[in-house]
Amino acid sequence: MSSTDNGGFKPGFKRQDNNDMIPVGLVRAMFALPVLALILVTYASVTGREKAAVPPPAPVEQQWSLRMIGHDAQAVTVLRADGSVLADMDHGGFVTVIQNGLMTMRRRHDIDPTLPVDIIRFENGRLAAIDPLTDYRVELNVFGPENHAAFEAMLEKY
């Protein structure tokens, strides 16, 4: 028997009992799902459908300008608009996450990451970090009460 002799084995797409390994209906559904998703997204884009996940507009109740300066993976210093230190955190937690996102967005647009970002409280209770220089916007209360409280505690000292 030679090393190339496979004993009569012939690989195929069907098992010996002639049943498909993967049902044809499942294969068709696998291809239909992304095609359907593409059709829906195209329809929404072409018709100008309103975005569903955008928070409702509300009047501004209060606004703060803060500068966030990251030092390493976790440390962050938050400065008031006049340059005085509002908070200096070795482990900034959620504040560091927001600062890292802001820094990344500004780096993409070749903008100084230490320029102020606006923290805005709306009349409907929402709190958002909005960068006036890029399209960066984070609704701070959607990340849970503890993360929202981290910014609220900082803003009370402002």
Image (cartoon, rainbow, N blue to C red):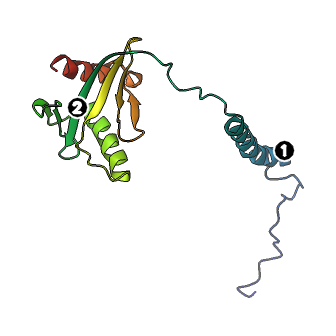
The vertical placement of 57 against 103, above or below, is above
Q: Residue at horizontal 52%, vertical 26%? A: 54
Q: Nearer the viewer, residue 140 or 118?
A: 118
Label 2, on which residue? Answer: 66
Q: Nearer the viewer, residue 151 or 94?
A: 151
Question: Cα distance, mark 1 to mark 2?
Answer: 56 Å
The 10 Å Cα crowd at callout 2, few under 14, some 14 to 19, many 20 or more, is many
- In terms of image quadrants, where is residue 155? top left
- In terms of image quadrants, where is residue 85? top left
Q: Residue at horizontal 42%, vertical 39%? A: 135
Q: Residue at horizontal 33%, vertical 53%? A: 110
Label 1, on which residue? Answer: 25
Residue type at mark 1?
Gly
Going by the picture, which residue comes out furthest to the top?
124
Left or right of 68? Residue 84 is: left
Q: Residue at horizontal 77%, vertical 78%? A: 6
Residue 17: horizontal and vertical position, in percent? Answer: 89, 54
N-terminal-most mark, 1 or 2: 1
- In terms of image quadrants, where is residue 82? top left
